[in-house]
Amino acid sequence: MTNRANHRGKGAALAAFLACALLSAIPAWADTKPARVVSINLCTDQLAMLIAGKGQLLSVSAIARDPQSSAMVKEAEGFPVNHGQAEEIFLQKPDLVLAGVYTTRATVGLLKELNIRVEQFAPETSFDDVKASMRRMGVLLGQEMRAEELVGQIDAELDRLKRLPRSGKLAALYYANSYTSGSGTLAHAALEAAGLENLAARLGIQGTASIPLEALVLAMPDVVVAGDRDYKPPALAQENFVHPAFRALIEHSGEVAMPVRNTVCGGPFTLAAVHMLRAAAGQELVAR
Amino acid sequence: MMASRGYWLLIGGLTFLTFVLFVLSLALGPAGIAFGESLSALFSGDGGPIVLIMQEIRLPRAILGLLTGATLGLSGAVLQGFLRNPLAEPGLVGISSSASLGAVLAIYTGFSAAFPLGLPLAALAGALIAVIVVQALAGSGGVLTVILAGVAVSSFASAMTSLALNLSPNPFAALEIMFWMLGSLADRSMTHVWLATPFILAGWLMLASLGRSLDALTLGADAAASMGVDLNRTRRFAILGTALSVGAATAVAGAIGFVGLVIPHILRPLTGGLQSRLLPASALGGASMILAADILVRFVAPGRDLKLGVLTAIVGAPFFLWLVWKSRRDLL
């Protein structure tokens, strides 16, 4: 009896303690802007660089300086880089760490155990996602105005694109290892915004999956949008681009190189990809 | 007389099976083209998509399936006869993985991009080193020595392959370890066929000429020498022939295990234990096995790029265990 009471007492004390901890913690986060922010994911790197105030962002991940993956290499050169390892992040004494949902799970778990606040962002699969991520980043960094400004720019641009005529041409996204992006991906959203039809979506492919070269050749798309071609040194992954059947196909269809960096994460640079795609389909961005 | 008729029946049956599988390999694929249409597109001259698919995607895949399968079956039979070891096989004794290492070094350093023949030549060099090492060790020890040497050679080569791929700055390279360890024929092109075929055919000629010598070798090295078999020539041909054919096949299709082990064992009882009869039967049997496996990978998990070595291991590994169990009993 006394034992049980004792337990209940402990439980209540613990609950009260947790409640206090939470109550005291939340206003602390909400009221003051975090001053030492570290980002360990390419997509949060780019959002943070777009939105953070001066001096607020301590470091970005090393991949943000990789011209193949990052659309903001120049900006990233203005920040120190980290390699996403718990030890180096901890030593930077951040009050907020920005991470992706799927990558570096072990690191994120460890940082949380060390009582560092970690906010995780899911990959964006549509322009709505991109806008939502921007707004969330604005709130987290206490830079709501800046975030709204960016969202407004994207909305204006999307509106402008919507009023332009759609070419409806069939486009195929084709990456290294014969991968393509179907519905539910940002690359698909970019094709749609450019007024093109995505072959992968027509074939019922959802997300990013491989497409047999046979299926690509059979569909004879109007435009082939190739990404990831130019990694050096060579790997088997890029052999699909030198396959005789693929070369014959692009002689018929024409090939546009679209850097994957523009659609792997969402941002204003994704709209640059849309313009590139429209230009490739022979439709410049001129309102008629 | 009876045995001879049975043998020709076996060869005829295996040839027919290989032919049927070759045609199926041409006719089946994700594009879902009708049978007649697909075969007539093979000989058509117009540049339409179906012709492109048949002539540039499916034909090289079927040809490479035939070539690599026959290579593995033939070289497995030769190695088992030459080393007088039932467990010898290009995969198990490390020849395939060493050829992979050679090919990996050629591709990922950019050497083969500048000099296309560098790819089969580097794989050949890797294979040659492995055959020489294994052969040298086989001379001094028993059944076990070859396998132990093979385990060491193949784990070393696999580790070096992984290292080379991990060190490559290309982000895709590390994922390609799978291709080099398990093999695949997906989206290979005529370029690969032209690169590998001369080496593979040269290797086959050398291996096929060994039938009589291997027959004599079953009686022991001394007896064979007294029957007029040139042991040095036999050794040279077995080593070079294996290195040429397995090296070139691995350079374009990756390392595919177990075919060279399973096929000669299944066919040996049907060929009356004569090596000279086993060699052509094994070549046809190996070709059938790879063609069948390559048809299966397209349908078991379409879109997932299942590797050939996975299927050959599912058949081969239990067989290998059974073989070890059986030879263990024989040793007692």
Image: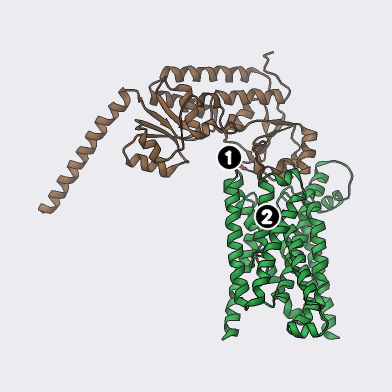
Q: Which chain is green?
A: B
Q: Which mark is residue B299?
A: none
**Residue B319 seen from this side:** no
Quarter of the image with the C terminus of chain A is top right
Residue B220: percent from left, percent from top = 73, 84
**Residue B230 seen from this side:** yes
Quarter of the image with the N terminus of chain A is bottom left
Same subunit, labels 1 and 2: the answer reads no
What residue does disc 2 label? B102
Decide: few, some or many residues near mark 2? Use Cα within 10 Å; few <14, some 14-19, many ≥20: many
Q: Is residue B241 above or below residue A271?
A: below
Work out whether residue A2 or residue B57 is closer to the camera in this orientation and state it. B57
What residue does disc 1 label? A207
Q: CA distance from mark 1 to mark 2?
A: 36 Å
Query: Which residue appears at 89% of the width and 44% of the height?
Result: B45
Query: Which residue appears at 59% of the width and 84% of the height?
Result: B331
Residue A275: percent from left, percent from top = 65, 22
